[in-house]
């Protein structure tokens, strides 16, 4: 199963301007697989992304919007894209000069491929 995670991350990481990508346990905020630049803390990004996705999902449900599929956080130095994949999330760190549309497509594709695969045990 680890190979499926790595394949999903490789597609995301190949997009120009992507600084890193992770597959994270959505409830725990623990990285399962990561491909990051050396100056990036995978544990910190995983915890932040899981908390944001979980809480935003609760808010979306309360607003009767349905299940949260993707989340995009914009900051001065770049963006974080998060795609829901059941009990997993796919996270990408995006530079300001990245091809954001292509990165978003790859995050969604990666999440869909993981969602379609076997569940974690």
Image (tube, grey):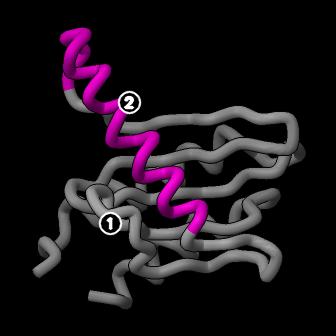
User: What residue is shown at x 42% (from left), y 61% (from top)?
Assistant: 110
Q: In the rendered image, which quarter is residue 32 located in? A: bottom left
**Residue 103: percent from the left, percent from the top?**
63, 50
Residue position for label 1: 25
Q: CA distance from mark 2 to mark 1?
A: 16 Å
Span shown in magenta: 44-66
Asked whether the viewer can see residue 113, the reply is no
**Residue 31: percent from the left, percent from the top?**
44, 74
Element on which disc 1 rests: strand
**In the orientation shown, which residue stands out farthest toward the top?**
63
Residue 80's place in the image compared with 40, above or below, is above
Q: Quadrant of the N terminus?
A: bottom left
93 lies left or right of 75: left
Looking at this view, is 112 or 46 the one in front?
46
Residue position for label 2: 56
Q: Which mark is residue 119?
A: none
Looking at this view, is 79 or 27 the one in front?
27
Residue 111's place in the image compared with 73, above or below, is below
In primary-sequence order, the first of circles 2 and 1 is 1
Residue 43's place in the image compared with 64, above or below, is below
**Residue 112: percent from the left, percent from the top?**
31, 55
Q: Quadrant of the C terminus?
A: bottom left
62 lies left or right of 89: left
Tell me if mark 2 has few (under 14), some (14-19) or many (20+) residues whose alpha carbon lies within 10 angstroms of its own. some
């Amino acid at each position: 199963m680890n190979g499926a995670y790595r394949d999903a991350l490789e597609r995301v990481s190949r997009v120009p301007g992507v600084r890193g990508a992770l597959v994270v346990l959505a409830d725990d905020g623990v990285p399962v697989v990561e491909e990051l630049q050396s100056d990036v803390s995978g544990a910190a990004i995983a915890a932040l992304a899981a908390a944001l996705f979980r809480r935003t999902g609760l808010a979306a449900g309360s607003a009767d919007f349905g299940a949260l599929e993707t989340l995009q956080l914009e900051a001065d130095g770049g963006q974080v894209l998060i795609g829901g994949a059941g009990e997993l999330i796919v996270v990408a760190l995006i530079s300001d000069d990245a091809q954001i549309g292509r990165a978003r497509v790859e995050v969604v594709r990666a999440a869909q491929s993981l969602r379609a695969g076997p569940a974690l045990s």
